[in-house]
Image (tube, rainbow, N blue to C red):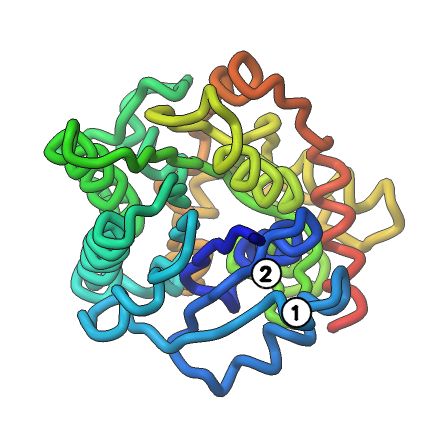
């Protein structure tokens, strides 16, 4: 009998690629949406890569509501918990971001435990690794220090992933369920839907003229296909349980990203804004304000577990940037 995977948050950037990958690999998928109004959008997106006929079903769930989670996971062999609130650049409310993230993993884990799921894979983030900016280089063993001044999104990812590992510890010996966390950095690449994903907005702003200059900000990049493939590998690989995997190819500063875009025929800014001016500029620009604490900070994430345990070879950051730009160009 064909195995089934529950994927929470089916309309998201990562989820769509993962659902497509799972179906291609011969797994049936049940996915949750906050509103079933988006069902056709998900089908249309996944159908760009694979037929969904008889392979994809839907349910309606809310990260803040208890109803429906047990039924959603019932009959599934694996869980891929991807749903988590992504704040807008102006969202500074802990209740909007942290509460649903922690409550969502709690509901999903309890439903998985109740339904004897084999393995639970969670989408965490490097925000749970180095979100407190306490040094320049991080690996899979590092955690964001919540005693420091940590933003809501970084707090939400850290608390949710900590909940996963605490839950597994508490239920040790009571269940055969295994757990894995995937911690992606900035995810670039083409989306399967017209919703390009929050991280691709960086590329959009560099090529649509809304960011006429670059800032001296360092980001770590991973291709969307690597993220989806790693979620799948984490679900089936015998060496994956109990581990967290940073998904990140390398780091680049905004001027380097702009150069890749310019070298490939996209019009990106060639002027770097001095850091002092950038800080002043951030008062008037919400998205720049979102990045202001990162100006002039080198932050590098080392994907040691991915390379050493899974033998992972990452797609290039350049290909992730160009794949995103290609799609964005058609939507502008």
**241 lies above or below 5:** above
- Let me know if residue 152 appears in the view: no
Number of numbered discs on residues: 2
**Mark 2 highlights which residue?**
16
Q: Is residue 77 left or right of residue 323?
A: left
The x, y position of residue 182, in whole percent, is 44, 36
> Furthest residue to the bottom?
37
The x, y position of residue 120, in whole percent, is 36, 42
**Mark 1 highlights which residue?**
193
Q: Which mark is residue 296?
A: none
> Furthest residue to the right?
265
The x, y position of residue 210, in whole percent, is 62, 65
| Alpha carbon distance from label 1 to label 2 | 8 Å
Determine the secondary structure under disc 2: helix
Q: Residue at x 57, y 53 (%)?
A: 2
The x, y position of residue 300, in whole percent, is 48, 23
Q: Quadrant of residue 282?
A: bottom left
Q: Residue at x 54, y 12 (%)?
A: 308
**60 lies above or below 323:** below
> Furthest residue to the front?
1
| Front position in the image: 320 or 246 | 246
Q: Residue at x 39, y 65 (%)?
A: 88
Q: Are marks 1 and 2 in contact (CB under 8 Å)?
A: yes
Q: Quadrant of residue 229?
A: top right
Q: Residue at x 20, y 34 (%)?
A: 168
């Amino acid at each position: 009998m064909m195995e089934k995977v529950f994927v929470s948050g089916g309309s998201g950037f990562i989820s769509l690629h993962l659902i497509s990958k799972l179906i291609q690999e011969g797994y049936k998928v049940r996915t949750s949406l906050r509103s079933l109004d988006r069902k056709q959008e998900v089908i249309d997106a996944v159908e760009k890569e694979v037929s969904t006929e008889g392979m994809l079903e839907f349910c309606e769930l809310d990260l803040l509501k208890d109803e429906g989670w047990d039924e959603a996971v019932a009959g599934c062999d694996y869980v891929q918990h991807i749903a988590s609130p992504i704040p807008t650049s102006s969202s500074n409310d802990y209740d909007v971001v942290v509460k649903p993230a922690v409550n969502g993993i709690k509901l999903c884990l309890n439903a998985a435990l109740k339904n004897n799921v084999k393995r639970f894979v969670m989408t965490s983030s490097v925000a749970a690794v180095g979100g407190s900016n306490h040094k320049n280089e991080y690996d899979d063993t590092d955690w964001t220090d919540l005693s420091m001044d940590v933003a809501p999104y970084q707090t939400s990812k850290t608390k949710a992933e900590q909940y996963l590992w605490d839950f597994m510890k508490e239920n040790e010996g009571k269940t055969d369920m295994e757990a894995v966390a995937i911690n992606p950095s900035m995810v670039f690449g083409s989306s399967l839907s017209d919703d390009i994903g929050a991280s691709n907005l960086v590329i959009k702003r560099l090529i649509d003229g809304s960011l006429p200059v670059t800032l001296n900000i360092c980001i770590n990049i991973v291709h969307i296909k690597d993220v989806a493939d790693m979620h799948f590998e984490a679900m089936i690989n015998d060496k994956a349980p109990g581990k967290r995997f940073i998904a990140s190819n390398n780091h680049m500063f905004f001027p380097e990203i702009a150069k890749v875009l310019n070298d490939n025929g996209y019009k990106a800014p060639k002027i770097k804004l001095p850091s002092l001016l950038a800080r002043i500029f951030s008062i008037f620009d919400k998205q720049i304000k979102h990045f202001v604490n990162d100006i002039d900070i080198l932050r590098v994430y080392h994907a040691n577990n991915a390379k050493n345990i899974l033998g992972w070879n990452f797609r290039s950051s350049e290909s992730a940037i160009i794949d995103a730009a290609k799609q964005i160009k058609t939507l502008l």
